[in-house]
């Protein structure tokens, strides 16, 4: 689940004509510049102003120390603003929004015929194939159905290969792989990063940089932060009070299980040595503009200066829902998981963190603390929202995400209900 799940309004499938959207290239010369012509991007300036008003609300109310939002269409930014104790030059940890970027790097190997989703992981990483894990497939890593959701791994273990292989070998299954869904906050993506290294023969951080970020001109997108960039990062702080067991009971909702994503783990990303690690499932550091433009690239095949980063058929393959009838144990709704991303679906889109007004084909992946990232092929809109305020209240956090997304989904001139 990539956002809130309190509002359970059933969503209707779009039936009207989408606003015009064309294949566009990201302008490599300066992708972070905001277009001066909203009309050419078919964006309503009044509706965009409503996005700004909503995105800054919790900062103005002093719940969050800062927030940053970017909206893009037609390959260009139409909005990039920052509120509170930060600027547009500030970088944010986007936590699990990183999963889409790691996954998109793996899609390139699939496209090149160097990786198959049907492969058994242990055939690629033999050290992983212990304690019953020798049947897990590559696809199950992306779908959070692999069966080891809370397997421990310290980010600083990554550089030591012997230590990380020992971790892989120690992990045990919680349940039969493929039999159910439970969100893997970080464990499965560590394995995806290892697969990328073994099949590409290259360092994971270097692969993401040279094959994804650099071709898109996204110089502020980091998986493994250079030391010189640390002063730009917005320091994470906890905000608000956590919900109690009584709060969950009153709402008739199950209490989320304890995971390795503790408050201390969240704050560990204030430490330069942790930021320097390529935490494949949750350690990406970037701006909201990088998120919006990354997703814009996924809408347009990553076309840059005549070069295409992903083939259209690769992106269609990656966005295909593969999770079948698997349901989220917290919300009870179908998880609609594709290869490392979530797809909005025909109903209950808000329960997956999308807007009521998103199309069924919208896709994305949010992150801890309320990070928002999605794109909608129906409207051509993509969005990134970042905050360094880690809201302890998941209900409030979820409502905020859907509320902001509702306004973003409605910014096109020919918007649909």
Image (tube, rainbow, N blue to C red):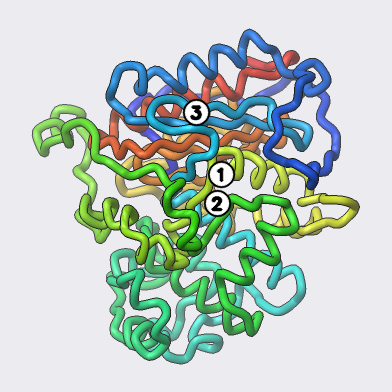
Q: Residue at x 22, y 54 (%)?
A: 262
Q: Estimate the spatial distance between the alpha carbons at disc 3 and disc 2, rounded to whole Å.
A: 26 Å
317 sits to left or right of 123: right
Q: Which mark is residue 273?
A: none
398 sits to left or right of 44: left
* Residue 213 to residue 157: above or below: above
In this view, the residue farthest toward the top is 46
Q: Which mark is residue 341?
A: 2
Residue where numbered disc 3 is placed: 82
Please tell me whether mark 1 sits on a helix, a strand or a loop: strand
**Image quadrant assignment for residue 144:** bottom left
Decide which of 236, 351 is in the foreground and name it: 236
Q: Earlier in the sequence, mark 2 or mark 1?
A: 2
Image spot of residue 214 (x, y percent): 70, 58
Q: Nearer the viewer, mark 3 or mark 2?
A: 3
Residue 334 in sight = no
Pointers 2 and 1 in contact (CB under 8 A)? yes
Pointers 3 and 2 in contact (CB under 8 A)? no
Residue where numbered disc 1 is placed: 364
* Mark 3 crowdedness (10 Å alpha carbons): few <14, some 14-19, many ≥20: many
């Amino acid at each position: 689940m990539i956002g809130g799940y309190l509002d359970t309004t059933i969503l209707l499938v779009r039936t009207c004509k989408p606003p015009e959207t064309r294949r566009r290239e990201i302008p490599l010369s300066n992708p972070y510049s905001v277009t001066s012509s909203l009309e050419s991007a078919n964006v309503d300036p009044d509706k965009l102003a409503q996005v700004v008003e909503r995105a800054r609300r919790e900062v103005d109310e002093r719940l969050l120390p800062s927030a940053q939002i970017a909206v893009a269409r037609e390959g260009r930014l139409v909005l990039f603003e920052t509120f509170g104790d930060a600027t547009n030059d500030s970088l944010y940890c986007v936590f699990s929004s990183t999963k889409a970027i790691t996954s998109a790097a793996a899609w390139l190997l699939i496209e090149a015929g160097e990786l198959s989703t049907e492969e058994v992981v242990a055939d690629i990483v033999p050290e992983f194939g212990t304690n019953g894990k020798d049947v897990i497939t590559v696809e199950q890593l992306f779908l959070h159905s692999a069966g080891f959701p809370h397997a421990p791994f310290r980010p600083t273990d990554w550089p030591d290969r012997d230590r990380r292989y020992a971790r892989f070998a120690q992990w045990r299954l919680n349940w039969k792989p493929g039999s159910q869904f439970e969100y893997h906050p970080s464990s499965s993506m560590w394995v995806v990063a290892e697969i990328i290294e073994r099949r590409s023969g290259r360092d994971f951080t270097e692969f993401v940089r040279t094959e994804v970020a650099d071709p898109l001109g996204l110089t502020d997108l980091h998986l493994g932060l250079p030391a010189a960039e640390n002063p730009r990062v917005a320091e994470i702080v906890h905000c608000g009070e956590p919900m109690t067991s009584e709060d969950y009971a009153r709402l008739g909702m199950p209490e989320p299980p304890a995971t390795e994503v503790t408050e201390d783990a969240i704050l560990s990303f204030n430490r330069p040595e942790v930021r320097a690690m390529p935490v494949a499932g949750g350690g990406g550091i970037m701006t909201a503009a990088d998120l919006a433009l990354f997703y814009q690239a996924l809408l347009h095949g990553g076309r840059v200066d005549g070069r295409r980063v992903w083939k259209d058929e690769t992106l269609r393959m990656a966005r295909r829902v593969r999770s079948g009838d698997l349901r989220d144990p917290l919300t009870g709704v179908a998880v609609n998981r594709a290869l490392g991303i979530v797809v909005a679906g025909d109903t209950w889109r808000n329960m997956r963190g999308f807007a009521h007004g998103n199309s069924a084909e919208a896709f994305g992946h949010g992150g801890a603390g309320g990070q928002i990232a999605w794109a909608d092929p129906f409207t051509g809109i993509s969005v990134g929202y970042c905050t360094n305020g880690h809201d302890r209240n998941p209900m409030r956090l979820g409502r905020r995400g859907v509320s902001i997304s509702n306004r973003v989904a409605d910014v096109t001139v020919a918007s649909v209900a």
